[in-house]
Amino acid sequence: DENVKPNLRSIISLLRLADWDPDVFWKFRQNILNQITDCPGRRRKDLCDGLLEVWDKYYHMIEIDKDIAFEIGRVYYGFGEYEHAMKFYDISCRTIGVHHITYHNIGLCYYSLGKLEQAADFFSNSLKLDSSYAKASSWLNKVLHEIREIRS
């Protein structure tokens, strides 16, 4: 049933039973993201470890309509694992192609790591791909303001 919203513990159990199948991850990706802030340490470790297995089992040449790398990046970002998130956003760009939202999300990772110049570059690149993307524009203005504050 598409309306069923299982808890994170059940999703992780299902992913384990499915041997970390990328299609199962894809089906429940939004449920995972919606519950990520309530994820205790052990469950978080299980999911983070499992995401690597999901990626290992994914055949991007066959399933180009599913950007599994991007979604794995989103989960890592939600856990505050910014370096891991950027790794998967980069894989997404290389396997599926560049996208303004992916560049925006990389900018958020750099911002969260305190790397303002790199964040500004990615927000700017996001806007080059879609000049109407308001989130990137807002973040770019915020980051440029912070850079100016630091320099003054």
Image (tube, rainbow, N blue to C red):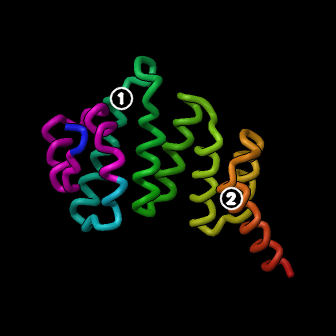
Taking 29 as reference, is 136 left or right? right
Asked if 78 appears above or below 104 in the picture, the reply is below
| Near-viewer residue (31 or 145) | 31
Q: Within 10 Å of the Cα at label 2, are there few (<14), some (14-19), or many (20+) other Cα atoms?
A: many
User: Label 2's element?
Assistant: helix
Task: Give me the residue at 65% from left, 56% from top.
Answer: 135
Q: Is residue 104 magenta?
A: no
Asked if 11 appears above or below 137 in the picture, the reply is above
Question: In the rendered structure, which disc, 2 or 1, sits on the residue that comes first in sequence?
Answer: 1
Dot label at residue 119: 2
Residue that sits furthest to the top in the current view: 62
Magenta range: 4-32
Q: Quadrant of the N terminus?
A: top left
- Magenta stretch secondary structure, dominant: helix
Which residue type carries mark 1? Tyr
Task: Give me the residue at 42% from left, 36% from top.
Answer: 68
Q: Is residue 16 magenta?
A: yes
Which residue type carries mark 2? Ala
User: Label 1's element?
Assistant: loop
Dot label at residue 58: 1
Query: Which percent across, then down, holds residue 35?
Result: 31, 60
Residue that sits furthest to the right in the current view: 152
Task: Give me the residue at 48% from left, 41% from top.
Answer: 70
Q: CA distance from mark 2 to mark 1?
A: 29 Å
Asked if 66 appears above or below 126 in the picture, the reply is above
| Near-viewer residue (117 or 124) | 124
